[in-house]
Image: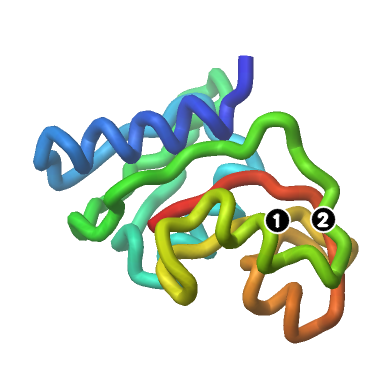
Amino acid sequence: MDTLSGALNSLKMAEFRGKSQCKISPASKVIREVLLILQSNGYVGEFEFVDDGKGGYFIVNLTGRINDCGVVKPRFAVKKSEWEKYESRFLPARGVGLLIASTPQGITTHGSAKERGAGGRLLCFAY
């Protein structure tokens, strides 16, 4: 079971149905980092962690900006010179959307990884 996949699917389906909030359960550090990146890029609004004694969950306020999001399976290893190849594969157009990757500097977007000259493992995409 992939918790990140379940979280992104919950976000996508709640946006599709026109909901204003979404509950993501169970919570994890990777999901929190992905939500922080999506929030900083304007795809989701504020979110909060609720500890229920079983692992917790996130309540996410939606902004209506997510058209599609999902995980990348298998988690491709990307060299610092290969970002454009994966942008064209997973994103609809150049400059639209973002890829989220796990790099040696932490979880970040493909744009900041390109600026730093780092490679990493692809986690997910959103646009």
Residue 43 visible in the picture: yes
Apparent side of residue 41 relative to residue 123 in the rendered image (left or right) = left
Residue 40 visible in the picture: no
In depth, the one of 9 and 31 nearer the eye is: 9
| Amino acid at dot 2 | Val
Query: Residue 115, relative to residue 104: is it above or below?
Result: below
| Amino acid at dot 1 | Ala
Q: Badge 2: how crowded within 10 Å, few (<14), some, or many (20+)?
A: some
Q: Where is residue 18 in the image (x, y as percent from the top left)?
A: 10, 41
Closer mark to the observer between disc 2 and disc 1: 2
Q: Badge 1: how crowded within 10 Å, few (<14), some, or many (20+)?
A: many
Farthest-out residue, top: 1
Element carrying mark 1: strand
Query: Residue 86, relative to residue 1: is it above or below?
Result: below
Q: In which quadrant is the N terminus drawn? A: top right
Q: Where is residue 117 in the image (x, y as percent from the top left)?
A: 85, 80
Q: Position of residue 65 (x, y in %)?
A: 25, 59
Apparent side of residue 120 relative to residue 100 in the rendered image (left or right) = right
**Is the residue under label 1 in contact with that under label 2 (CB below 8 Å)?**
yes
Q: Which residue is drawn at 74% across and 78% down?
A: 114
Q: Residue at x 41, y 69 (%)?
A: 96
Q: Name the residue under label 2.
A: 78
- Which of the 4 quarters of the picture holds residue 92? bottom left
Q: Residue at x 54, y 50 (%)?
A: 90
Q: Mark 1 points at which residue?
A: 101
